[in-house]
Image (cartoon, rainbow, N blue to C red):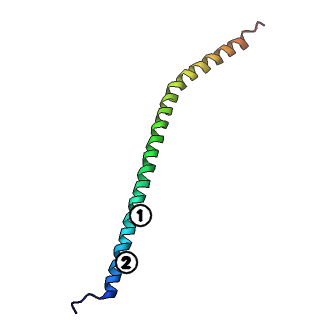
Amino acid sequence: MTEPNDALLEVLREIRDDQRKLLELTISRFDEVHRINARAEAIQDKSARIVGSVQKFVPIALIAVTILIVYLSWLLFRVPR
């Protein structure tokens, strides 16, 4: 009874092989997730730079539009009667 059973050894080998495949799959998924995460961080950095530049541009554009509206209003309402 101390001799290992061949069927039991075969099952243990299959379990070992499946665990090895699962580990390889997990490592490949981890690498893929790491790559996607790095890409997402790069996109977030780029969008943060874009938002920063827009935040600098909008007040200037708003002032320019306000000046143009005031000027056009002045042109429209200065007509002598």
Q: Is residue 20 above or below residue 11?
A: above
The residue identified by callout 1 is 25
Look at the numbered disc 2 and give the secondary structure of its residue.
helix
Circle 2 crowding by C-alpha within 10 Å: few under 14, some 14–19, many from 20 = few
The amino acid marked with disc number 1 is Leu
Q: Quadrant of the C terminus?
A: top right
Q: CA distance from mark 2 to mark 1?
A: 16 Å
The residue identified by callout 2 is 14
- For residue 13, which numbered disc appears in the image? none
Q: Is residue 44 rendered to the left or right of residue 8?
A: right
Residue drawn 24% across the image and 89% down it: 3
Residue drawn 32% across the image and 87% down it: 6
Residue drawn 29% across the image and 88% down it: 5
Position in image of residue 55 (x %, y %): 50, 28
Q: Is residue 38 rendered to the left or right of residue 58?
A: left
The amino acid marked with disc number 2 is Glu
Q: Residue furthest top?
A: 80
Position in image of residue 25 (x %, y %): 41, 63
Q: How many marks?
A: 2
Q: Is residue 80 rendered to the left or right of residue 9?
A: right
70 vs 42, nearest the viewer? 42
Q: Is residue 75 above or below residue 20?
A: above
